[in-house]
Amino acid sequence: MPKYIFVTGGVVSSLGKGISAASLAKLLQCRGLKVTLLKCDPYINVDPGTMNPYQHGEVFVTEDGAETDLDLGHYERFLNVDMHHTNNFTAGQVYETVIAKERRGEFLGATVQVIPHITDEIKGRIRMAAKGHDVAIVEIGGTVGDIESLPFLEAARQLGLEVGKDSALYFHVTLLPYIKASEELKTKPTQHSVGKLREIGINPDIIVCRSERPISPELRAKIAMFCSVHKDSVIQAPDVSTIYEVPVVFQKQGLDEQVLMVLRTRASQMDFEPWKNLVDRLKNPKYEVRIALAGKYTEIKDAYKSVDEALIHGGVAHDARVRIKYVDTTGPAADVDAALEEADGILVPGGFGDRGIEGKLRAVQVARERGIPYFGLCLGMQLAVIEFARNVLKLGAANSTEFDQKTRYPVIDILPEQKAVTDKGATMRLGSYPCAVRKGSLAHKAYGSLTVSERHRHRFELNNKFRRLIEEGGLQVTGVYQPKNLAEIVELRDHPWFLATQFHPEFKSRPEAPHPLFASFIGASLDRARSRRGKGQETYAK
Ligand code: GLN
């Protein structure tokens, strides 16, 4: 029977609940337990696929093609295991299922209500995802006190009652704000949010306090007393330079022991050395490389989360710190040029819609003409093809039909089956597809394999009518989804490193297993740093 840990958030959002949950999961995994994580999102959207990054940050895609919350990316990266569509569900999905059941007559005679029908559906989904694991960590989105999250908290309370005291643990992540004027960390908001939890029948077992500064033993004792937990169960989570350090910070405070004690679970000795070494490598790299990420959501931190992380992992593979510079492509081309000046490598990530497209095309052109390593992801590949068609093949009006439906040269086009799609939700080409890699290509060298499988999220594809022309010009298709003969990877001949993928390799990169293409891209960028700044100058200056 799985044990359950419910993770709630207090005081404010954006406390890094997902990272705390993933870090706890990592510790339990290192103690030999089979752990899974789930995220419950209290919003009405069926999934985040239709939200824009301003609302939601990145949409993370799983192997089985679910468009999910970006916390699932953290779960995969920390645990180094794949998540599935069952690991993330929303209020929208829950209500959709319950209403469909009502229409089928499954509740005949009953009034369908939040309690028990909605809460039963929530519990059923949690139990299903937990099956086959020793521990399921269930993160409940939102902040305690929100109207939306109430049914989820109620379901967590009920589930705890059903499985019994030793099988459920409540883990509350909260904020201790620092008041400059009095030079104090304040506990009152935490007391209030724990009070709110108690009102609905949940007593937290562990309190994780996010704070800018260290918490004194006295303050810890105070929180313990007011919140009715043991003082060893008050865990500090100060800001750290890399998110991957959070499990180390937790372990030092004995969090794994605390949790195992509450859950009365026996586990093996901690096998934590590999993770600690990884954190050491991340914190003390020998080299430094500068990557320009040219996109339109450069002002929101979470919009390109998996790309940022995959770049960092690529750095780990080369003992290099990756400095990411976000280049806003919505401004004038001259600004883009100037921003790319210092770049050792240029990356154009995925995207939708035509805002910022010309700036991104400019970034591709700069990379191609100046021999700067270029990595294009999804839209970044489509733009590499468009730029090549326009400026090398001299097809001036070349475009994607996403941006110009009547273009004379639709080098990127929508497949007929996508044209027929009317609903926008969950209808893209999504999830994992196999890709056959061309022998001797850059991709082949990086992967060390001729067949790979990668995750997708797009509607448009390279138009095969132009494929020969493009290949003869020197932009080669080196990866193909054979059943439909779709181009998956393109590479430029006579360039130090110019590779772009129709899929999203960033979703599969893990700190313990950097993605081969990201590692190869960082390697090439580091080579450029060495040749430009002189060998030795790429050394990271502390
Ligand atoms: N907008 C493009 C498409 O739908 C690219 C999508 C993406 O970059 N994820 O094909």
Image: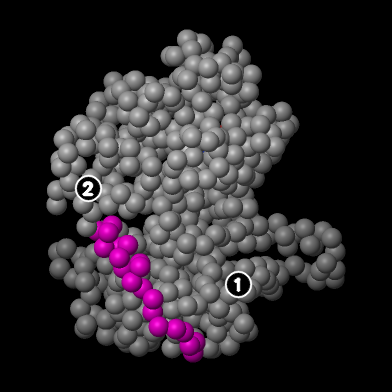
Q: Nearer the viewer, residue 212 or 429?
A: 429
Q: How many marks?
A: 2
Secondary structure at badge 2 equals strand
Instruction: Classify 387 as above or below 245.
Output: above
Is any atom of residue 305 visible in this view? no
Report which quarter residue 466 is drawn in: top right
Local packing at callout 2 (Cα closer than 10 Å; few below 14, some 14-19, many 20+) is many
Residue 430, x across and y down, in percent: 62, 44
Instruction: Classify 99 as above or below 111.
Output: above
Q: Give the residue displayed 17% in from the left and 46% down from the top.
A: 539
Q: What amino acid is found at the position of numbered circle 2 in the picture?
A: Tyr
Query: Which mark is first along the chain, 1 or 2?
Result: 1
Q: What amino acid is found at the position of numbered circle 1 in the picture?
A: Ala
Residue 528, x across and y down, in percent: 26, 34
Check if residue 277 falls in the magenta segment: yes
Report which quarter residue 464 is drawn in: top right
Q: Give the residue displayed 59% in from the left and 69% down from the top.
A: 151
Secondary structure at badge 1 equals helix
Residue stretch in magenta: 264-283
Residue that mark 2 sits on:
287
Instruction: Classify 241 as above or below 106.
Output: above
Residue 122, x across and y down, in percent: 64, 68
Relative horizontal placement of residue 180, taking residue 444 as reference (left or right): left
Residue that mark 1 sits on:
130
Is any atom of residue 15 visible in this view? yes
Report which quarter residue 16 is drawn in: bottom left
Image quarter where the N terminus lies is bottom right
Instruction: Classify 277 as above or below 324.
Output: below
Local packing at callout 1 (Cα closer than 10 Å; few below 14, some 14-19, many 20+) is many
